[in-house]
Amino acid sequence: MHTGKLIFSQLMDHLPMHTFRRCVHRYQGNHKIKTFTCRDQYYAMAFAQLTYRESLRDIEACLRAQKSKLHHMGIHGGIARTTLAKANERRDWRIYADFAQSLIPTARKLYADEDLGLDLDNTIYALDSTTIDLCLSVFPWANFRTTKAAVKLHTLLDLRGNIPTFIHISDGKLHDVNVLDILIPEPGAFYIMDRGYVDFARLYAMSQCLAFFVTRAKANLKFRRLYSRPVDKSTGLRCDQTVVLTGFYSHKDYPEKLRRIKYHDIETDKTFVFLTNNFTLPALTITRLYRYRWQVELFFKWIKQHLRIKSFFGTSENAVKTQVWIAVSVYVLVAIIKKRLKLEASLYTILQILSVTLFERMALFQALTDCKNTMPEDDMRNQLNLFDLTSGQ
């Protein structure tokens, strides 16, 4: 019988705490703090994410019920909702942002050999955003509409492992396309985006950085066909053209050639027009690449359902960003553990098991493998048709 560490402690052992201490020191997170350090705060918030706590009072009640085990969890400060609320309010959210970002390269290395079903060695990213609606009277800093507040989570997802590599949290007013000004394109990588990111000046800047993009053309696109490549119409392809833009501003913003591909999806009886600056991949591969854009939609849906970011434990901008970044770090941590322990279970199943075993004294691998997976797999993949672009993006 295993009589060693708690499951929670074994989870936290996979975190590079030397990196965490550097992040805390960088922003003086423990300055004049005698009890309830940044590590205590992180552990308490990570516990809340892993066990689906709904409020500060909920966190306090659950941890106080296990008071004798707090020291073994690594939490050495007293647990009180007012203390945790003040920590979320005052301690720089960048501590947890930097720490989450330090975990991402580790996860990406573990998932680098994931097979996407495409004969393609390039890194493939999906870029999109999700809006989290808030109450304007409670979150006045999160401007969105006259009577509504919101925050936007702009995410760049590495599709090998669905690891978020870039996250920007903004108020609801920031248009998606403006994120391209913050993003640093990676040469040789593919960026899959919806029509909301079609800005030819920004796309041209990406092309100049030797990165590739795949997006959908807007209905009012003005162009001139230079020549066409032969296509097999039985595959759904309708045309594969090299074009130049003819609109005054669009041609000025993107003076070079573009590739225009029209595809008809038999299953949905819909036709899609794609634009890309890649002229070497087969046209059918380009259409398949765009299918993977829905992985970022699934990521948003998954993280909203299974981590606590829709109900916040604080109302200030600092508290909201702290909670979101800790949620992201927990997601990446679970993804890392899945690979390190070579687990076949989905992230959904792993989180379900962890939510009820954190205080158990048994080997982590045993806890995650002994339970026969009788729970249904997360069925989000069946809830969205990959080409059902009902949002109009």
Image (tube, grey):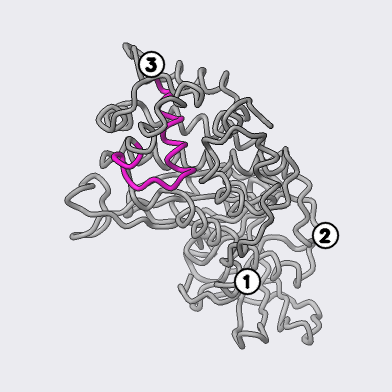
Question: Considering depth in this image, is 223 or 280 the residue closer to the camera?
Answer: 280
Residue denoted by label 1: 274
Please tell me which of labels 2 and 1 falls first in the chain: 2
On screen, residue 365 above or below 157: above
Residue pictured at 81% horizontal, 80% vertical: 230
Q: Which mark is residue 119?
A: 2
The image shows a total of numbered marks equal to 3
Q: Position of residue 340 (x, y in %)?
A: 72, 38
Q: Position of residue 266 (x, y in %)?
A: 67, 86
Image quadrant where residue 229 sits: bottom right
Residue located farthest toward the front when viewing the structure as drawn: 1
Relative side of 97 to 15, left or right: left
CA neighbours of label 2 inside 10 A, class few (<14), some (14 to 19), many (20+): few
Residue denoted by label 3: 30
Residue pictured at 53% horizontal, 40% vertical: 330
On screen, residue 184 above or below 194: above
**Element type at marker 2?**
loop
Q: Any magenta on residue 53?
A: yes
Q: Which residues are magenta?
A: 37-59
**Element type at marker 3?**
loop
Q: Position of residue 310 (x, y in %)?
A: 37, 53
Measure the C-alpha gap from mark 2 to mark 1: 20 Å
Please tell me which of labels 1 and 3 falls first in the chain: 3
Residue pictured at 44% horizontal, 23% vertical: 75
**Magenta residues, dominant SS class:** helix
Question: Considering depth in this image, is 275 or 5 the residue closer to the camera?
Answer: 5
Relative side of 43 to 349, left or right: left
